[in-house]
Image (cartoon, helix red, strand yellow):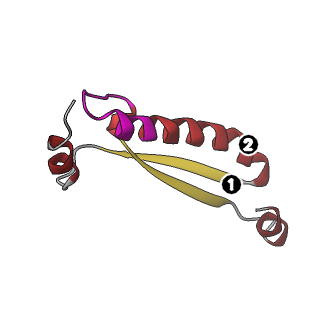
Amino acid sequence: LRDYTSANPDKWAHIGLVSSVAGFFSSAGGSPYAASKFALEALGDSLRGELRPYRIHTTLYEFGAVVSSIAEASDSVQL
């Protein structure tokens, strides 16, 4: 990162993190998934402050429900 910002003193870099609304709202049976999204929330918050002096922005993209096979996999988990 330092090499990039040294070589490009007039430019800003950008890091995008892809998360989910599960970082805000979790449900029974989804704890591993929700925990990973909470972790991305914390990572994005920390990186924002740490990387600003190097002219690097961070953005956390949080998507809502998406049709995928993860719901089918979670149905097979026995609690």
Which range is magenta?
24-36
Foreground: 23 or 12? Answer: 23
Q: Could you tell me how far apart the alpha carbons at marks 1 and 2 are, in whole angstroms? A: 9 Å
> Label 2: few (<14), some or many (≥20) within 10 Å?
few
Label 2 sits on a secondary structure element that is helix
Foreground: 24 or 35? Answer: 35
Q: Which quadrant, please, contains the N terminus? A: bottom right
Expressed as whole percent of the image width and height from the top left, the position of residue 24 reads 37, 29
Reply yes or no: does residue 68 show up in magenta: no
Amino acid at the residue labelled 1: Ile
Q: Is residue 3 above or below residue 54?
A: below
Amino acid at the residue labelled 2: Glu
> Label 1: few (<14), some or many (≥20) within 10 Å?
some
Expressed as whole percent of the image width and height from the top left, the position of residue 21 reads 33, 37
Foreground: 34 or 3? Answer: 34
Expressed as whole percent of the image width and height from the top left, the position of residue 9 reads 81, 65
Circles 1 and 2: CB atoms closer than 8 Å: no
Write down the residue under mark 1.
56
Write down the residue under mark 2.
50
* Number of marks: 2
Expressed as whole percent of the image width and height from the top left, the position of residue 72 reads 15, 49
Which badge, 1 or 2, comes first in the chain's sequence?
2
